[in-house]
Amino acid sequence: MKRTTKLTTLVAVMAALTNFAFADEKGNEIMNKVADFKKPAYSVTDVYMILTDKKGTQDSNGFREYGKEDGSKTYIVMDFKTGTNKGTRFLQITDDNGPDEKHIYLPALKSVRRVNSSEGSKAFMGSDATYDDLTTRDVSEDEHQYIGEEKMKVESGKEYDCYKIKEIPIDKKGTQYNYRMVWVDKETMYPIHTEMYDKNDKLIKVLEVLDIQKISGYDMPMENKLTNVQTGHSTTLKIAKVVALDQEIPARYFTQNFLTTGK
């Protein structure tokens, strides 16, 4: 949304301010709907993580992912089965009322350690995502500026009718990005294209959802691609199989003991 530079009356000034207030209100409304995206209480999926360098050389890792939604907490476990990360297991606990917890088991060390907040900018499993990228930001942590409506065609060729939102962190010390531009699909209310800009306002990463499918009543992102435009390296996450949805998973799967034993 562009702000006019020829404001000659108080009425015009107030009208402009009202428009901006409405834009922010609408941006917040949209991103709150995104945050309320319908997810299964339990999920088990088989996923491939494909790392591609700028020359096109690929490295593939396969893992089984377990997910649980439990009130204010979300649990995710990744159990790597194939590739260079085979034997590695990762647990993340997201709490709406407090900081996230991240724990990782590395087979070479045969032990579990907690990922500290100071490691947030480090790459996760050699991918283009950092540990901070894995953390879901609360809607209240950002200012959401409604830019307008726009068509967005992703790499797979599919075109979406979207809302365009600019997300600006309220506390810029707590994030590696100066701002994000987000395109939210109107039909699913899922962000299908996100651009991340560094502290110098230069584009650093692009996250695209290449395929969304409705499975058992849920809109599921089946293939995502995160590209570091500054290095030419990319990470693709592709769900090869949805094993189970809404089938209770034993609580032991979401513990540090499971990370150690795999049982």
Image (cartoon, rainbow, N blue to C red):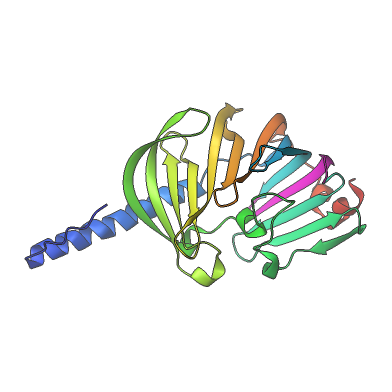
- The residue positioned 74% from the left and 51% from the top of the image is 125
Q: Is residue 88 above or below residue 131?
A: above
- In the image, which residues are magenta? 70-84
Residue shown at 66% from the left, 34% from the top:
238
Q: Nearer the viewer, residue 183 or 186?
A: 183
Where residue 226 appears, x then y in whole percent?
A: 59, 44
Give the image quarter of residue 175: bottom right
Residue 203 lies, in percent from the top left, at 48, 54
Horizontally, residue 79 falls left or right of residue 235, namely right
Res. 44 in view: no
The percent coordinates of residue 81 (x first, y second) are: 84, 39
Is the magenta region chiefly helix, strand or loop? strand
Q: Which quadrant holds residue 162?
A: top left
Q: Residue at left 39%, top 50%? A: 165
Residue 257 shown in magenta? no
- Please tell me which residue lies in front, 261 or 6: 6
Residue 6 location in percent, x, y? 11, 61
Q: Residue at x 91, y 59 (%)?
A: 109
